């Protein structure tokens, strides 16, 4: 069995669904079900004995020790985190608690379990840390994409907390020999993405006839990867990655934000035309994100060279599937737009002048 943390979140849920679609190896899914965790994303696994869900915190050492002792996983795939940059600006404490202290507690519980294994099981064990390209900081237009040896220059409370967790994972390998692998991935998009992030927010707001808030000049660049491609990259690195190594994962799909928003509008115009006119009429430029990173781009040649991984989707195919998914899953979208969601929208957007 593998232990997945944060498996009810966006990428974690996609990973669990993808894993169990291709393997009968059970998943122990530990998730605290914060605002971002949603068991409805895993509804298709109801009654499936291969999926064992435990509601709990990665910072709860006693719970972790019990889970390791009972289930004896052969690997940990660590997704659990606070993941939204804007939330980290409004309230950084939760990011330190989960991303730094939580990862520390998980590493210690893993080390304690792993140390007592016999030599072959010890060698086969993996701790896979799922991290982000944001730890490398911001690129200018002409800089080369991030490689695994780039220096860490995190700029937001979120990326600083992820950078700290990456350093802990590295140190637990270097000092204690824990067989870790780390992946630093670019921006994901796809089904089950919480509508606080750019692409699902634009889809959900457009369908509701609300403004589409573009920060600053909209020329910030992100490198987009379809979430199922991230899941396949993690499987490849978990299976064949070398302990202690870092692998950058990306989609070779650099796009400015404003282009993403226009693409979403054009797809909605085609799939759900609005008699009032193109959805692009709703685009509204608003006050920029403080400390906003200008450009991220990933050099994913190492994972291709060593493990033969490449993304299967282009941006054109992935974004079309994504918009279709949101149109076909209005119930999921409606359920995540709770009072707490509306409060967040108010906190983040009401003070941004158009
Ligand atoms: P998400 O916010 O959608 O999901 C996070 C999940 O972690 C939620 O289910 C939440 O309930 C759970 N969680 C939070 N705190 C917890 C705690 N203390 N104990 C147990 N569970 C807890 O995030 P996501 O977008 O799916 O990202 C998953 C991971 O991938 C994160 O580590 C993130 O840094 C990383 N990442 C995300 C992206 C992206 O584009 N979304 C890109 C690269 C890397
Ligand atoms: O690069 C990987 C990272 O990608 C992950 O580590 C993070 O967990 C994930 O949230 C994401 O971070 P970003 O800040 O890049 O994603 P977000 O969807 O919040 O924003 C994407 C871009 O769109 C960014 O330049 C900010 C801009 N934006 C975002 C929102 C929510 C807007 O212009 N308007 C918005 O309303």
Image (tube, grey):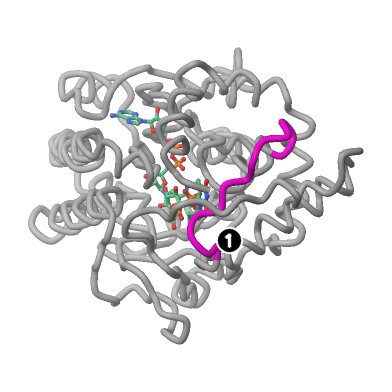
In the displayed structure image, the side of residue 151 where residue 237 appears, left or right? right
Residue 163 in view here:
yes
Q: Is residue 259 left or right of residue 144?
A: right
Residue 133 x/y as whole percent: 39, 62
Q: Which residue is depicted at the point 20% across and 28% down?
A: 59
Which residue: 50% across, 23% down?
342
| Crowding at mark 1 (Cα within 10 Å: few <14, some 14-19, many 20+) | some
Task: Report if residue 209 lies within the magenta region.
Answer: yes
Q: Is residue 236 magenta?
A: no
Quadrant in the picture for the N terminus: top left
Identify which residue is drawn at 31% across, 19% down: 56
Foreground pick, 335 / 121: 335
Give how far across and how far down residue 251 sits, in percent: 58, 65
- State whether residue 27 appears in this view: no
Q: Residue at x 73, y 51 (%)?
A: 264
Label 1 near ligand 2 (CB < 8 Å)? yes
Q: Quadrant of residue 81?
A: top left
Outermost residue, bottom side: 142
Quarter occupied by residue 326: top right
* Residue 35 x %, y %: 42, 24
**Is 106 displayed left or right of 229 in the figure?**
left
Residue found at the very far left of the displayed protein: 175
> With respect to residue 165, does 241 lie above or below?
below
Residue 324 appears in which quarter of the rendering? top right
* Image position of 204 with respect to 124: above or below: above
x, y percentage for residue 231?
A: 54, 49
Residue at the extreme front of the image, as rendered:
353
Which residue is tagged 1?
A: 257
> Which residue range is magenta in the image?
206-218
């Amino acid at each position: 069995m593998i232990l997945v943390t944060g498996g009810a979140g966006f990428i974690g849920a996609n990973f669990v669904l993808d894993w169990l679609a291709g393997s009968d190896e059970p998943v122990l899914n530990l998730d605290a079900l914060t605002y971002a965790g949603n068991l409805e994303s895993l509804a298709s696994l109801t009654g499936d004995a291969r999926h064992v869900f435990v509601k709990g915190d990665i910072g709860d050492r006693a719970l972790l020790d019990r889970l390791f002792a009972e289930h004896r996983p052969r690997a940990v795939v660590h997704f659990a985190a606070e993941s939204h940059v804007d939330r980290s600006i409004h309230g950084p404490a939760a990011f330190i608690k989960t991303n730094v202290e939580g990862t520390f507690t998980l590493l210690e519980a893993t080390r304690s379990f792993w140390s007592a294994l016999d030599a072959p099981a010890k060698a086969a064990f993996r701790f896979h840390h799922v991290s982000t390209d944001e730890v490398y900081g911001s690129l200018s237009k002409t800089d080369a994409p991030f490689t695994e040896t780039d220096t860490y220059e995190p700029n937001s409370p979120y990326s600083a907390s992820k950078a700290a967790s990456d350093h802990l994972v590295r140190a637990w390998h270097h000092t204690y020999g824990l067989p870790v692998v780390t992946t630093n991935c670019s921006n994901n998009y796809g089904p089950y993405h919480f509508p606080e992030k750019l692409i699902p927010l634009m889809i959900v707001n457009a369908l509701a006839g609300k403004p589409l808030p573009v920060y600053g000049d909209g020329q910030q660049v992100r490198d987009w990867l379809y979430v199922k491609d991230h899941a396949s990259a993690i499987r490849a690195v978990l299976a064949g990655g070398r302990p202690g190594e870092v692998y950058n994962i990306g989609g070779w799909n650099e796009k400015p934000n404003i282009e993403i928003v226009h693409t979403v509008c054009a797809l909605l115009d085609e799939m759900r035309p609005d008699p009032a006119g193109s959805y692009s009429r709703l685009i509204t430029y608003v006050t920029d994100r403080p400390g906003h990173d200008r450009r991220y781009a990933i050099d994913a040649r190492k994972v291709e060279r060593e493990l033969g991984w490449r993304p299967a989707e282009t941006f054109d195919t992935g974004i079309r599937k994504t918009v279709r998914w949101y149109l076909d899953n209005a119930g999921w979208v409606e359920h995540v737009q709770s009072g707490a969601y509306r409060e967040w929208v108010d906190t983040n957007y009401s003070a941004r002048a158009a």
